[in-house]
Amino acid sequence: MFVGLDIGTSAIKAVLVDETQAVLATAEVPLSVSRPQPGHSEQNPEDWWQATLASLDQLKAARPVELAAVKGIGLSGQMHGAVLLDASGAVLRPAILWNDGRSAAECVELEAAFLGLHTVTGNLAFPGFTAPKLLWLRKHEPDIFARTAKVLLPKAYVGYRLTGEMVEEMSDASGTLWLDVGKRDWSDAALAATGLDRSHMPRLVEGSEVAARITPELAARWGMATPPVLAGGAGDNAAGAVGLGAIHAGNAFVSLGTSGVLWATTDRFAPNPQSSVHAFCHAIPATWHQMGVILSAASALGWWAQTEGISPGDLLRPLGDAPVAPSRAIFLPYLSGERTPHNDTAIRGAFVGLDHETTREALTQAVLEGVAFAFRDCLDALNAAGTTLATADVIGGGSRSRYWTAVIANVLGLPINRIEDGERGGAFGAARLARMAATGESPAAICLPPRRIETIAPTPALQQAYAEKHARYRALYPALKGVTS
């Protein structure tokens, strides 16, 4: 038996998986986000911990015998968040999250301070990444910065509470701007550029390796006679890739979660930071990946549903199963700024092209198309980085919508595969990493792909119509930047 825990932004999710990789039980405990100022996004790490305990308690209530037999636990986590600990291991302030935009100025300072940043880390300095957050803290909260003894990412903090040890793995560490991504080791030069050194960092392992063991006290709480191992785990997108079996070069997927990702697995470190594509380590050894990232995906639909006072399902139902033509309206989904390709935290979203005939259905369609156009920007950036995709799976909460999947297929010009259990996500991948850590089995033996239930191919006429509309969408960014930035 194996457990996967996903330390997400909106919830902690847990899955209990048996030796056949069947999911026996699931649990989910919601979380809230604090936004103390515009552009700020924070969470209390204690909330993650209490929700983790509650989720495992729910698994025990549902399957006590099976949970007691668990051999390994794996963690998936929201990336980039800065958890600051003092010398005693106490949290110093709320964690600054991945979608926090306060450190844009510090990104400029970091790139000036460390000219080798792009070469070593394979990435531009984005405000969402961890290192610029520490520069912001050094400037604006110097007392907190001075007391910081360790910086952990969200899942590493939960791992610390589970085991008493501070350990991180390569995929999540890649999003800090402190990792030499090619060498899979901390970069002393990158750390020095933010006033830190290796003593501030946790120990590094691969995601499929043993990081530590659960404390005996916690094991007893869940009826485990032998404390299970804790795997290194993975950042949320890498965990999703492990769950999908996207471990071989050329594997690709679209993630329609809170944020959005266009992922491509690679067998080498292949950076091209000027295209705003991320080049990170994968969660398994000797493997890397590229990602285009958009900051609002399913969350854009969630915002629109909340604004309209209706559930997302009820918004989507009138649209049917597939589009017949693009909406006349255009939506730019920059509700939290944008990462790929613009690296712009200040840009904000908009509806464009409204008239007296514009209906709620037309605006809903425009929201779905706007997110798809943002993914097309990511695809163009991946192509510029030398990566060509032949097909992609779709995962995340938005993958429930066949209509949205069809829009994405036509906008990207790629066959998009809907898969069985497309929402199992990071927690399932974390459980697979737990199994590999506990048993020593290989990724190729464990990370098998799910069954594809449908492949939606683009149609030539609709693909051309969306290509023309995407060109209009791209032309709007400079004008929008002039009035919202």
Image (spheres, grey):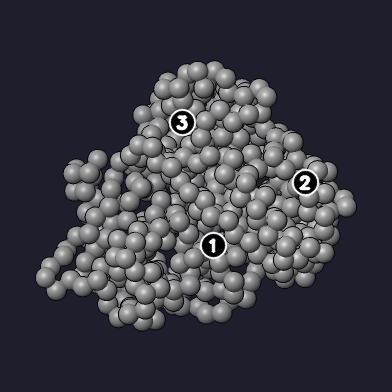
Q: Are marks 1 and 2 in contact (CB under 8 Å)?
A: no
Residue 439 in percent (x, y) is at: 83, 56
Q: Nearer the viewer, mark 3 or mark 2?
A: 2
- Report the number of numbered marks: 3
Residue 298 in percent (x, y) is at: 42, 61
* 250 lies left or right of 21: left
Query: Which badge, 3 or 2, is on the more N-terminal residue?
Result: 3
Write down the residue under mark 3: 132
Label 3, label 2: how far apart the Cα atoms are = 35 Å
Residue 205 in percent (x, y) is at: 72, 41
Q: Quadrant of the C terminus?
A: top left
Residue nearest the viewer, comparing 443 with 4: 4
Whether residue 81 appears in this view of the structure is: no
Label 1, label 2: how far apart the Cα atoms are = 38 Å
Is residue 274 shown above or below 146? below
* 66 lies left or right of 173: right
Q: Nearer the viewer, mark 1 or mark 3?
A: 3
**Local secondary structure at mark 3:** helix
**Residue located at (82% from left, 55% from top):** 223
Which residue type carries mark 1? Ala
Query: Which badge, 1 or 3, is on the more N-terminal residue?
Result: 3
Q: Residue furthest left?
A: 356
Mark 1 neighbour density, 10 Å: few (under 14) some (14–19) many (20 or more): many
Write down the residue under mark 2: 218
Q: Quadrant of the N terminus?
A: bottom right
**Residue located at (32% from left, 80% from top):** 318
**Local secondary structure at mark 1:** strand
Residue 262 in percent (x, y) is at: 47, 58
Which residue type carries mark 2? Leu
Whether residue 136 appears in this view of the structure is: yes
